[in-house]
Image (spheres, coloured by chain):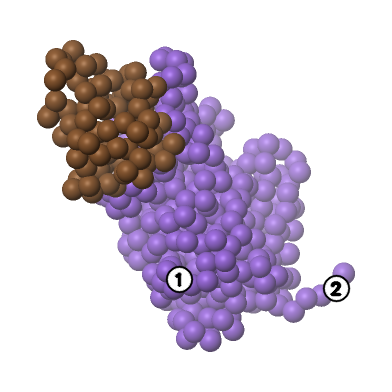
Chain colours: A purple, B brown
Amino acid sequence: MTATAPFDVAVTGVGAITPAGASATESWERICRGEATAATDPRFAGLPVDITCRIPGIDPAALIGPKASRSQPRVSQLALLAAREAVKDAGLLPGCWDGARVGVVIGTGFGGIDVFEEQHSRLADLGPKSLHPLVIPMALPNMVAGHVAMDLGATGPNLMTGTACASGATAIGMAREMLRTNMCDIMLAGGAESALTPMILAGFARIGALSQRVHQPSVAGRPFDRSRDGFVAAEGAAVLVMERMEDARARRAFVRARISGYGSSSDAHHVAAPHPQGVRVEQATRAALADAALGTDDIDHVNAHGTSTVLNDLIEGRMIGRVFGGGTAVTSVKGVTGHTLGAAGAVEAVCSVLTVQHGLIPPTAGLTDQDPDIALDVVTGAARPHPVRTVVSNTSGFGGHNAVLVVTAA
Amino acid sequence: MTDYFETLCTMIARHFGVDREEMDVSTTLAELDLDSLALVELGYAVGEELGASDAEQAISGESSLGEVALMIETANGGQSG
């Protein structure tokens, strides 16, 4: 095997729309305050679990405008808002770039499944003529990446990544490879999810993944806590603008942080449960470190997948302890945001970028009684000011997908 | 017909981002740059929101806004003309 030189890409822009806020800054501030966003969702009254984390206070369709939003599912609208914010943050003007050199990779678990579910009911109740003529292009998961390209005139390579709850991190990792191989000069990469539907909520409840604490939504998600019992399903989107370091320097762009490593693996073990020893998520973590040419002692912080399910947190927590020792500061932002599924890896990449930029580690909301089997330095209560030069951000998804990013200081 | 015409114009403006000032009773859908898929969407919206369920088959790029408004009025039991 030939060793390759470490390859850093510059993160020159970030955008996010999450239950914690309508922009990356708003989201970051609430995540750092550790204020949970889970609440009772009246649309799901009567289902076994009726708590979710929803984006508050804005109407994405109205922000995008009727002409564009009429043929877009909500997941695309969220991706578009995050992408526009990221591009603006990077100081780029969509009309003024060579579109053929701008690529888009967006991960999503479910795409426009909300449209599909609603239209399926119409098909069953009212017949085929009642279907919306755009049901297929609205429901296809790849359309999220397609819509971002249409909105911003990004005519370079374009794809969606599907690795369930690792999709957003996979997208960023693959986008970095596309910069490495010179396929593009600018990559818009991230994840988006808006799959808060009766089918998805009931389905996740059926497999036992959701917290049952429906009467205490604000403390339902409690990553690494002894009494954790599942995640709270959420919606959101996050996008990074990524460029080769020399290109970012050449146009004097402000570099928030770098993506310096990516590793991925498959448990090849079970459809939903992680491998009991976490050997493959460890393999992906070590691959990401090797890619970044960093050792385990070089890592200042782990932004964990930390879903608040019994199995994930135990297996991931033990893996982190095994690889990095118990002294590395760990957090899971899902105590605030809930689990944004296919967007989670991108939301957490944005948090990792802002952590190295600002030297601040957000707390793990909901955690009050740490599981004694998870012997880690988990940040709780308040955000911890700490000079952080390197972050490992883990994600895993149903199907056994693991995707790990290494984020380093600019 | 005037009310249905105004409702139709409002709907087209909302769904397709067409400026209200571009729309007259004699304006055809093709003149508004509605492509074939947009025509199907419009037919669907007119059926769903304005009760003219036959419109999807009846309208074409050559249809004027006045003619579509008339279809809506007829479907809603109104008198033509």
How many numbered markers are drawn? 2
Q: Residue at x 43, y 19 (%)?
A: A129
For numbered disc 2, what is the local secondary structure? loop
The answer to whether the residues at label 1 and label 2 have Cβ atoms under 8 Å apart is: no
In this view, which residue lies farthest toward the right?
Answer: A1
Q: Residue at x 22, y 27 (%)?
A: B69
Q: Nearer the viewer, residue B35 or A6?
A: B35
- In this image, A382 relative to A401: left or right? left
- In this image, A358 relative to A406: left or right? left
Question: How far across and how far down the image is residue A169, in percent?
Answer: 58, 57
Q: Residue at x 60, y 77 (%)?
A: A244
**A291 over A17 or under it: above or below:** below
Q: Amino acid at mark 1?
A: Gly
**Gap between marks 1 and 2 measured at Cα:** 32 Å
Q: Residue at x 25, y 27 (%)?
A: B67
Question: Tag on residue A2?
Answer: 2
Q: Nearer the viewer, residue B27 or A238?
A: B27
**B51 over A160 or under it: above or below:** above
Answer whether residue A168 is visible to the viewer in this image.
Answer: no
Question: How far across and how far down the image is residue A269, in percent?
Answer: 75, 41
- Determine which residue is flagged by label 1: A13
The chain to which mark 2 is attached is: A
The chain to which mark 1 is attached is: A
Q: Earlier in the sequence, mark 1 or mark 2?
A: 2
Quadrant of residue A220 in the image? top left
Quadrant of residue A39 in the image? top left
Question: How far across and how far down the image is residue A371, in percent?
Answer: 54, 50
Q: Amino acid at mark 2?
A: Thr
> Crowding at label 1, few (<14), some or many (≥20) Cα neighbours within 10 Å?
many
Answer whether residue B78 is visible to the viewer in this image.
Answer: yes
Q: Quadrant of the N terminus of chain A?
A: bottom right
